[in-house]
């Protein structure tokens, strides 16, 4: 049996903000027909009764870190730099089982909250491994979510990336930090090449990519090698770009130009490239990304959680730059809820200008979280839309839920009212993965016990690494706070209507 008929539901059209009675016929994982009720289907087709359900495209998470799911709710007043300082203990000492578990936990939350595809920049300490990335891919495959899996790679440590930071540390801490090393670049790229040569998953569902961490964490030779390798294997690249003012200032100091301009000078930008965050960009940076056909993964939740700023999304869209929406990792955004990310994207746009015409409309936000994110994942024209030929990645929302009583404007309510609690059914590639709000592919009770055991084990294993990070925290925080007071021509901290 390859056919599934979804009948009696209301299909949301985000462009017109209407919900129309329609049937959907799925064949071999793709949408074959969308039409008025009464579509004919083969006699042996599976039937899903969608009465009292609103059918929307599955939401697409354009940026997260699956490894972070084991540490949701951590670091109360962490900035991005304090998060990076904590990175070694947050992801350290993990077995293959822990890596699989973290990705499974991320997938479980995303699926239950209506997300059907994700771009995951997964961290392994001290460096990516073939077995580790396969464990992550297997976790997503077993969960039934569509995923792009990219190992995070770099050849500089966080402390090497920020000019003068090491010199600002007390001598005893400076000596310990100077001993921190990354894995040699040649070894890292050997692993990446082996991963790409021996990808064991169906690329229609689980796709490889590469994730050079941050420009300042990568030498120019490293960036060029990563770019060339990605082009050789025709896979995507995603990188954190100008996420914080610290990065923007350090980039100008290190390169004599903006981070985006430097990447452009290396030939790094292109349709295969997605810039995560992209907060501290000027108009020239935005134009560079747009001209090269790149994408941006907008993460309003973590941008605010870490105090990084508010991305200039309206300016990006006006320049023709593709933008998707992401949650970022649960260790810096606390959840994997794309409904929350959409609402925050809408609200954040209102803090950049008093001109309400420049605010993101709910229709635009819905497009960012579906077709925009799909393009950022390299899946443009394949998923993110309820139309013939597209992957059958669908979410059915319960219209009897209080979020929808009464229904006024369905797109406004989707963005501003829905919080994932009305998610009833989730379908990925025609496969039913959530029914009656319950995940079918993962034993959530076992996931809970495994996660608690893992945290206890990893807490003990990373005790010394965490203690060092906590000693460093006040020094890193003070140095970066001082640096952030330096002037910069880009304003991304809710300072509306400043002159360009």
Image (cartoon, grey):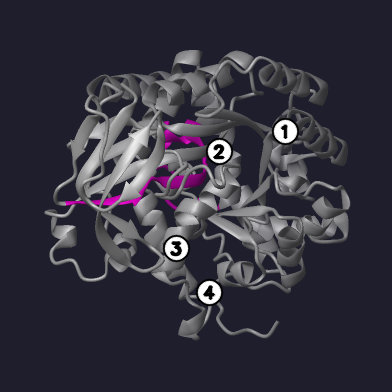
Q: Is residue 180 left or right of residue 419?
A: right
Residues at marks 4 and 2, CA–CA distance in whole angstroms? 27 Å
Ranked by sequence position, the earlier of labels 4 and 2 is 2
Contact (Cβ within 8 Å) of mark 4 with mark 1: no
Secondary structure of the residue carrying tag 2 is helix
Secondary structure of the residue carrying tag 3 is helix
Q: Is residue 110 left or right of residue 297?
A: left
Ranked by sequence position, the earlier of labels 4 and 1 is 1
Q: Quadrant of the N terminus?
A: top left
Residue 398 image position (x, y, % from top left): 18, 50
The correct choice, above or below, for 480 with respect to 382 in the image is below
Ranked by sequence position, the earlier of labels 3 and 1 is 1
Between 214 and 77, which is closer to the camera in this rendering? Answer: 214
Residue pictured at 50% horizontal, 23% vertical: 136
| Label 3 sits on residue | 365
Which residues make up the magenta segment?
A: 53-79
- The mark lying in front, picked from 3 and 1, is 1
Secondary structure of the residue carrying tag 4 is loop
Contact (Cβ within 8 Å) of mark 4 with mark 3: no
Residue pictured at 72% horizontal, 29% vertical: 180
| Label 2 sits on residue | 86
Disc number for residue 494: 4
Residues at marks 4 and 3, CA–CA distance in whole angstroms? 19 Å
- The mark lying in front, picked from 4 and 2, is 4
Is residue 345 located in the magenta-colored stretch of the structure? no
Is residue 63 located in the magenta-colored stretch of the structure? yes
Between 454 and 59, which is closer to the camera in this rendering? Answer: 59
| Label 1 sits on residue | 234
């Amino acid at each position: 049996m390859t056919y599934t008929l979804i009948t009696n539901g209301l299909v949301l059209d985000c462009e017109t903000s209407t919900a129309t009675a329609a049937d959907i016929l799925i064949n071999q994982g793709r949408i074959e027909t969308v039409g008025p009720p009464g579509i004919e289907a083969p006699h042996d087709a599976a039937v899903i009764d969608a009465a009292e359900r609103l059918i929307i495209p599955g939401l697409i998470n354009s940026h997260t870190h699956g490894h972070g799911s084991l540490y949701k709710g951590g670091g109360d007043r962490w900035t991005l730099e304090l998060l990076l300082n904590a990175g070694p203990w947050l992801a350290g000492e993990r077995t293959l089982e822990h890596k699989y578990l973290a990705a499974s936990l991320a997938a479980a939350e995303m699926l239950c909250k209506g997300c059907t595809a994700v771009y995951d920049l997964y961290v392994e300490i001290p460096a990516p491994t073939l077995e580790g990335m396969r464990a992550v891919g297997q976790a997503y495959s077993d969960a039934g979510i569509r995923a792009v899996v990219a190992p995070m790679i770099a050849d500089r440590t966080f402390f090497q990336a920020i000019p003068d930071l090491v010199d600002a540390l007390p001598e005893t801490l400076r000596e310990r930090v100077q001993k921190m090393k990354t894995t040699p670049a040649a070894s890292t790229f050997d692993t990446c090449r082996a991963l790409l040569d021996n990808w064991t998953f169906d690329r229609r569902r689980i796709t490889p990519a590469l994730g050079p961490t941050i420009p300042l964490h990568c030498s120019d030779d490293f960036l060029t090698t990563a770019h060339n390798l990605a082009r050789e294997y025709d896979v995507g690249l995603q990188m954190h770009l100008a996420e914080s003012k610290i990065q923007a200032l350090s980039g100008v100091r290190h390169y004599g130009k903006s981070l985006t301009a430097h990447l452009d000078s290396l030939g790094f930008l292109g349709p295969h490239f997605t810039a995560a965050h992209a907060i501290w960009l000027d108009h020239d940076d935005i134009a560079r990304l747009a001209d090269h056909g790149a994408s941006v993964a907008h993460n309003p939740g973590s941008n605010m959680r870490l105090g990084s700023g508010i991305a200039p999304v309206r300016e990006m869209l006006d320049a023709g730059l593709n933008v998707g929406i992401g949650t970022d990792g649960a260790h810096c955004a606390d959840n994997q809820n794309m409904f929350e990310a959409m609402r925050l994207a809408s609200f954040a746009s209102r803090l950049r200008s008093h001109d309400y015409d420049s605010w993101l409309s709910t229709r635009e936000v819905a497009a960012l979280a579906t077709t925009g994110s799909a393009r950022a994942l390299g899946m443009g024209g394949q998923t993110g839309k309820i139309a013939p030929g597209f992957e059958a990645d669908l979410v059915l929302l319960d219209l009897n839920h209080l979020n929808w009583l009464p229904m006024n404007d369905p797109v406004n309510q989707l963005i501003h009212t829905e919080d994932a609690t009305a998610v009833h059914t989730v379908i990925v590639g025609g496969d039913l993965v959530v029914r009656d709000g319950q995940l079918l592919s993962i034993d959530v009770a076992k996931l809970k016990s495994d996660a608690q055991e893992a945290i206890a084990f990893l807490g003990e294993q990373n005790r010394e690494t965490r203690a060092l990070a906590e000693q460093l925290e006040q020094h890193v925080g003070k140095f970066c706070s001082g640096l952030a007071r330096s002037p910069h021509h880009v304003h991304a901290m809710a300072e509306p209507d400043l002159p360009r």
